[in-house]
Amino acid sequence: SDYSQEPARHPALKINAKEPFNAEPPRAALVASYVTPVDMFYKRSHGPIPIVDDINRYRVSICGLVEKPKQLSMDEIRSLPKYNIVATLQCAGNRRTAMSKKKTVKGVGWDVSALGNAVWGGAKLADVLELVGIPKLTATTPMGAKHVEFISVDRCKEENGGPYKASIPLRQATNPEADVLLAYEMNGEVLNRDHGYPLRVVVPGVIGARSVKWLDCIEINKEECQGFFMQKDYKMFPPTVNWDNINWSDRKPQMDFPVQSAICSLEDVDIVKQGKLTISGYAVSGGGRGIERVDISLNGGKTWVEAHRYQRSGVPYVSDDVNGDKWAWVLFKAEVDIPDNAEIVVKAVDSAANVQPETVEEIWNLRGILNTSWHRIRITNAL
Ligand code: MTE
Ligand code: MO
């Protein structure tokens, strides 16, 4: 693998793996703005960042079980109606390091910043699929297709040197309300190389792994994608499953992510002066379930107060409609009086009243995905 032509990155990013490049911003950078700046957005790759240097020759092909396969240029994709969707992208491995502290798990370590909130600009996949004769709201085609597979330009070792790939159900792909995008813009700028230039999929509300970057082909298939990241990774197992008794075919590929929150204004173990303290962080849920409430405890979860949440207002490129936040995080804030040796805890509740699990033990899994346990901060007081 050739890592000699990687793009420049912001020096403040914390690098969790160098080759392939995996990095997250410092916690405080996440709560600095509702829309995460591109250079502070976590970067998750499985191989060298591909170079698409001749944009005029770039095509995305749509093939598989379609009567008229098509090759679309960027101009053709740009000529479709353009949507700007605010969506939080979260890696299933977010907060893996904390899960590994209980008992070692396999995978790149991440603190609490393997997510970001962006304004994604592009065409809706539902509109693109109409161009090859698949109508909106199709679950199965007459040819028996049920899945839409995304195949990338990049190459990774997990696929034995083949491209990264993933799929989503056709029902979701053809549902305009699912807001699945072929995005060519991020925060109003041309998508950069790290995030999938020239074109990536954004599947809102679903773990980041399904939002395939550097898109090469869209394949319409009977079966879900048989690639590594769908079949041998990113599946949720119970705590009893270990590397000796694992049976990958027992479980479905993880799609929606569950309700999540974390404090970003403090490190896990921190020293603060007694007195007033502002606690801030993010809360987000998958599947289009927005956040209903964020609770804060100063005593390890015995008693709780409700945090104030601050939603977006006046985000450029996006109208302030009611559903505007269903794919996006909320940032929260709480002004508290810090007692001696506090254990500060946060948990969020989503619009379906789902709550985060209390401990990491109950959701521990060998791949270390979806650590959504209550986020705890241990405070010692500075004199
Ligand atoms: N797409 C390709 N082609 N190659 C990849 O390695 N990583 C996936 C997904 N799409 C990946 C990919 C994973 S696991 C995540 S979490 C997101 O991209 C990360 O997107 P980002 O780097 O834009 O934050
Ligand atoms: Mo990921």
Image (cartoon, rainbow, N blue to C red):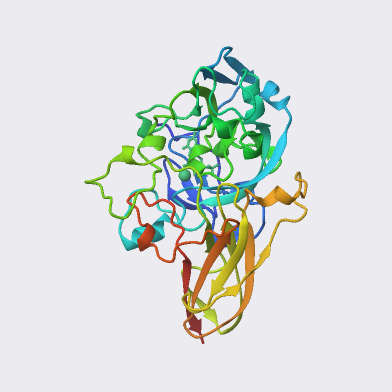
Instruction: Tell me what residue is drawn at x 75 percent, y 56 percent.
Output: 313
Judge by depth and name the residue closer to the eye, 22 or 374: 374
Q: In which quarter of the image is residue 137?
A: top right
Q: Which residue lies furthest to the top in this view?
A: 68
Can residue 134 be seen at all in this image of the molecule? yes
Percent position (x, y) of residue 90? 53, 49
- Establish if 129 lies above or below 371: above
Instruction: Tell me what residue is drawn at x 41 percent, y 41 percent.
Output: 19
Can residue 55 be seen at all in this image of the molecule? no
- Establish if 371 lies above or below 190: below
Judge by depth and name the residue closer to the eye, 266 or 257: 257
- Establish if 297 lies above or below 72: below
Q: Quadrant of the N terminus?
A: top left
Q: Indicate left or right for 164 with 285 as reference.
A: left
Q: In which quarter of the image is residue 170?
A: top right
Percent position (x, y) of residue 35? 66, 52
Judge by depth and name the residue closer to the eye, 357 or 138: 138
Q: Indicate left or right for 241 with 347 as reference.
A: left
Q: In which quarter of the image is residue 329?
A: bottom right
- Establish if 7 lies above or below 71: below
Q: Residue furthest left?
A: 244
Instruction: Tell me what residue is drawn at x 46 percent, y 48 percent.
Output: 92
Percent position (x, y) of residue 207? 50, 45
- The total of numbered circles placed on residues is 0
Percent position (x, y) of residue 164? 45, 31
